[in-house]
Image (cartoon, helix red, strand yellow):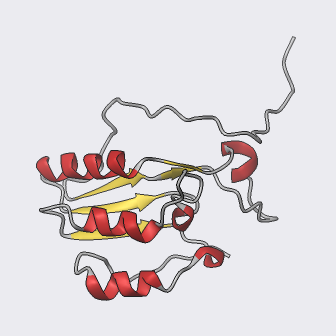
Amino acid sequence: MQCTCACILVDPLHIMEDMTKPKRGSTTTAWVNIIYGCNEHCTYCVVPGTRGVEQSRPKEAVVAEVEALVKEGFKEVTLLGQNVDAWGRDMAPKQLFADLLAAVSQVPGIARVRFVTSHPVNYRHVWCTAYREWAHMTSQYAFIQ
């Protein structure tokens, strides 16, 4: 008998991070997950139904991963999530993505910080300030709509 049921996630999964060492395709740049899931429910997107609601990684965990990457010789990180600019809004107390950007960009030895993917509904003027004040931020945006 074959199961034909589908699982749709509507509650937080309380994701446990995989502590095994991720595969890195580069010795210069690394991808760092900062948030899992999404709450936007765009008509064309399956992420909320397949990956669940937004769950941000703690700032301390993200910064520790970036520090470890720098020690391994990485110079650039790309912060990843379906909706990175929503990072921290599921935390208590809520935190701002700009605060995470500041913390990561201040890691000694990091040369460049990128992020994907952003959602225009969560865009904040403070990120323009981040690009001006933090030399490590790259000047690019990748918005989904």
95 sits left or right of 82 in the view:
left
Seen at 16% across and 53% down, the residue is 70
Q: Is residue 139 visible?
A: no
In what quadrant of the picture does the C terminus appear?
bottom right
20 sits left or right of 50 in the view:
left
**Does 15 sit above or below residue 139?**
above
**View extreme (top): residue:** 1
Q: Residue 82: x and y, percent?
A: 58, 59
Q: Residue 113: x and y, percent?
A: 30, 69
In what quadrant of the picture does the N terminus appear?
top right
- Return the residue nearer the eye: 2 or 28: 28
- Return the residue nearer the eye: 100 or 72: 100
**View extreme (front): residue:** 93
Q: Residue 46: x and y, percent?
A: 74, 53
Residue 6, quarter of the rendered image? top right
Seen at 77% across and 65% down, the residue is 42
Q: Residue 99: x and y, percent?
A: 39, 67
Q: Is residue 85 visible?
A: yes
71 sits left or right of 25 in the view:
left
Seen at 18% across and 62% down, the residue is 75
The number of discs equals 0
Seen at 60% across and 74% down, the residue is 122
Residue 77, quarter of the rendered image? bottom left
